[in-house]
């Protein structure tokens, strides 16, 4: 689960991280009062969407040379004008896709005198099975670009969970970020704070880009991007309360009600699969034969008829899905349950696009019998390769 920048900063502030004063607003009428709560004389007006690249983004409704989604204001009047221009409009960034995201809230923040911009993040490093810091002096930039062009400027530092952030590890991070004086003293305090927050709140990613050294020599968290492990949210009611469903795909919200692993994609073939690995393989082979998956969907190993029905209905609700591939390898998941769930969904919402079904494993013959005797226009498949070729061909023919 993702949260907004201002929410992430509030979480980090609770742990003692240095962040600027700021006020979140939801209408332009609140802008003047929000700005007056802050010291000034410089304010930053920040669009709050679940996507990066806001500063370089463009609003669909505004002229091409209009300022982006993060703006400086030197007067309260400018704060208000920017708020009126940004709220309710659609911001397109490198991470939103062409459709962009509607800006429903802004964060008015006190400005900062920046001397240097740094990059710092924490993530789960699967190569070593530990939480790791990623640090670079190249802040304010796309870290992937830095990794590709100047990898020597990036330090990845795993943290032993039994030791935490030791003085030695904190010093290594300070050295990597070239911190000295007050900034170094701040860093030695900040790194353990961030690690504690990451672990205690079950974060999946904590990215600060940039972490700044101000002209007075101290550190400040200027931006913060945080996402949480969805499997651990049951023990964090305070974090769940921060969820902004307006930033999520409606189909993904519906899927979460049934504990379905669903991610909407941009392709044209809907997929219903059991098992994450098989789902990934199914998506790959669809691409191999010249089409694109419309979603990732893992119904899980022990799905009920109701769960399968819900999954199928979510797929069919996607207007981009011009065909559907059901690929089930039954172990714990029984093929007859899948068949009954598909039939129940089709009876409720109809079947307007080609459907290819590949069943194998537990109760496979019964599952095939249910499908074959249903009267549905279903294309059977013998294996995954056969299924992928048939659904791609069926969609192309239908077009």
Image: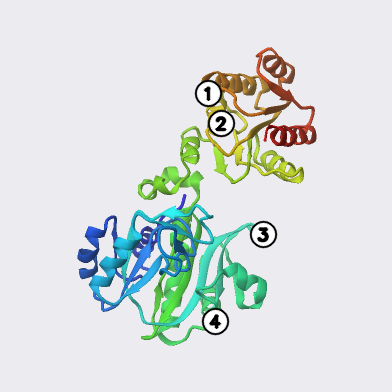
* Residue at image mark 1: 349
Q: Earlier in the sequence, mark 2 or mark 1?
A: 2
CA separation, marks 4 and 1? 60 Å
Label 4 or label 2, whichever lies nearer to me, is 2
Number of residues whose C-alpha sits closer than 10 Å to that of mark 1, classed few (under 14), some (14–19) or many (20 or more): few
Alpha carbon separation for disc pair 2 and 1: 8 Å
Q: Which marked residue is nearer to the observer: mark 3 or mark 2? A: 2
- Mark 2–mark 1 CB contact (< 8 Å): yes
Looking at the image, residue 195 sits to the left or right of residue 217; the answer is right
**Mark 4–mark 1 contact, CB under 8 Å?**
no
Q: Is residue 318 visible?
A: yes
Where 384 sits versus 222, above or below?
Answer: above
Q: Which residue is mark 3?
A: 127
Query: Which image quadrant for residue 291?
Result: top right
Q: Is residue 166 visible?
A: no
The residue beneath circle 4 is 175
Identify which residue is drawn at 33% across, 60% down: 106
For label 3, the SS is: loop
Q: Which mark is residue 316?
A: 2
Q: Position of residue 296 (x, y in %)?
A: 61, 41
Disc 4 on helix, strand or loop?
Answer: helix
**Distance (Cα) linking label 3 and label 2:** 38 Å
Q: Earlier in the sequence, mark 4 or mark 3?
A: 3
């Amino acid at each position: 689960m993702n949260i907004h920048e201002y929410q992430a900063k509030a979480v980090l502030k609770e742990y003692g991280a240095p962040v600027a004063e700021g006020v979140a607003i939801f209408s332009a009428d609140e802008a003047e009062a929000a700005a007056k709560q802050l010291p000034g004389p410089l304010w930053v007006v920040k669009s709050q969407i679940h996507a990066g690249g806001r500063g370089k983004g463009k609003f669909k409704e505004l002229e091409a040379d209009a300022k982006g989604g993060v703006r400086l204001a030197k007067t309260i009047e400018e704060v208000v004008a920017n708020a009126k221009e940004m709220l309710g409009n659609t911001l397109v960034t490198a991470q939103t896709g062409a459709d962009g995201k509607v800006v429903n809230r802004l964060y008015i923040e006190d400005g900062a005198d920046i001397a240097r911009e740094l990059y710092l993040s924490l993530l789960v490093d699967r190569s070593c099975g530990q939480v790791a810091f990623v640090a670079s002096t190249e802040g304010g930039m796309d870290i992937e670009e830095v990794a590709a062009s100047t990898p020597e400027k990036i330090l990845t530092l795993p943290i032993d969970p039994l030791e935490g952030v030791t003085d030695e590890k904190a010093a290594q991070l300070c050295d990597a970020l070239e911190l000295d004086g007050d900034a170094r003293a701040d860093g030695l305090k900040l790194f353990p704070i961030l690690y504690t927050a990451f672990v205690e709140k079950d974060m999946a990613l904590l990215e600060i880009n940039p972490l700044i050294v101000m002209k007075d020599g101290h550190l400040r968290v200027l931006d913060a991007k945080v996402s949480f492990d969805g499997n651990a949210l049951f023990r964090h009611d305070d974090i769940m309360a921060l969820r902004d469903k307006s930033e999520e795909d409606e189909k993904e919200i519906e899927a979460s009600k049934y504990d379905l692993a669903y991610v909407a994609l941009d392709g044209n073939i809907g997929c219903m699969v059991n098992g994450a690995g098989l789902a990934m393989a199914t998506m790959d082979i669809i691409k191999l034969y010249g089409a694109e998956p419309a979603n990732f969907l893992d119904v899980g190993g022990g799905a009920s008829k109701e769960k399968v029905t819900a999954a199928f209905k979510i797929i069919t609700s996607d207007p981009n899905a011009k065909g559907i591939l059901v690929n089930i390898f039954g172990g714990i998941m029984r093929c007859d349950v899948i068949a009954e769930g598909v039939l129940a969904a089709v009876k409720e919402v109809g079947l307007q696009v080609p459907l290819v079904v590949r069943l194998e494993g537990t109760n496979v013959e019964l599952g095939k019998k249910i499908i074959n005797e249903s009267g549905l226009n279903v294309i059977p498949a013998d294996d995954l390769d056969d299924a992928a070729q048939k659904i791609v061909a069926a969609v192309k023919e239908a077009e």
